[in-house]
């Protein structure tokens, strides 16, 4: 029988406590323990970006963090950012620009793009591509994603679509 460790975190504004194995990844904790399935698991090596969340205010690959390491932390997932309206404009732009197809990469793309636009809403196409380079998309070819992020940046600055 394996030892379970208490983990208390705030997820999307709600406190959560669970007892988990030391080796449980944060991505699996979110998906299996909390049923927040917007956090996708792709490569399990931190390369694809599908598991991207915000942990204590920083973009984090949740497959590279153990749930016990996040103890005491604040986690925001795509569900939380969607529910609180923070990424509504990005989601709309992704839809309007056809920047999603299978949708597997979309949650990680949205979180990463949102962080970029918070820091730099006037990011150039090259800067957008650089920022999103750690998020793999096998369907869209990125052009529509860059269009959506660029459009959202302009809108956040008060510009036209």
Image (cartoon, grey):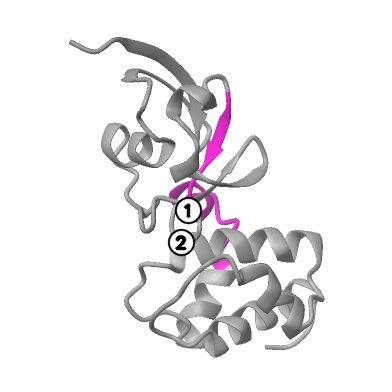
**Of callouts 2 and 1, the N-terminal one:** 1
Q: Could you tell me which secondary element the residue under label 2 belongs to?
A: helix
Q: Quadrant of residue 34?
A: top left
Instruction: Give yes or no for residue 76 being in the magenta stretch.
Output: yes
Up/down of 105 relative to 83, above or below: below
In the displayed structure, does residue 101 sit left or right of residue 94?
left
Residue depicted at x 31% and y 42%? 31
- Residue interval drawn in magenta: 73-88
Question: Which quarter of the rendering shows the C terminus?
Answer: bottom right
Q: Which residue is mark 1?
A: 78
Give the residue pinned by disc 2. 107
> Whole-percent x and y of residue 132?
61, 70
Q: Residue at x 73, y 66 (%)?
A: 117
Other residues around mark 1 within 10 Å, as few (<14) / some (14–19) / many (≥20) = many
* Residue 113: image location, x then y, percent: 63, 66
Neighbourhood count class around disc 2 (C-alpha, 10 Å): few under 14, some 14–19, many 20 upward: many
Q: Quadrant of the N terminus?
A: top left
Work out whether 77 lies above or below 105: above
- Could you tell me which residue is drawn at 37 percent across and 38 percent down? 30
Q: CA distance from mark 2 to mark 1?
A: 6 Å
């Amino acid at each position: 029988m394996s030892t379970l460790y208490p983990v208390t975190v705030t997820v999307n504004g709600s406190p959560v406590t669970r007892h988990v194995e030391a080796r449980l990844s944060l991505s699996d904790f979110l998906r299996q323990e909390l049923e927040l399935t917007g956090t996708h698991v792709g490569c399990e090596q931190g390369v694809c970006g599908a598991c991207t969340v915000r942990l204590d205010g920083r973009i984090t690959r949740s497959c590279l963090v153990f749930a016990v390491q996040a103890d005491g932390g604040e986690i925001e997932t795509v569900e939380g950012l969607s529910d609180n309206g923070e990424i509504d404009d990005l989601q709309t732009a992704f839809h309007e620009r056809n920047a999603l197809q299978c949708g597997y990469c979309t949650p990680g793309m949205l979180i990463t793009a949102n962080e970029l636009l918070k820091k730099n809403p006037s990011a150039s196409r090259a800067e957008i591509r650089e920022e999103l380079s750690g998020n793999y998309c096998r369907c869209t070819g990125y052009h529509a994603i860059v269009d959506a992020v660029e459009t959202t940046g302009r809108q956040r600055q008060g510009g036209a679509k």
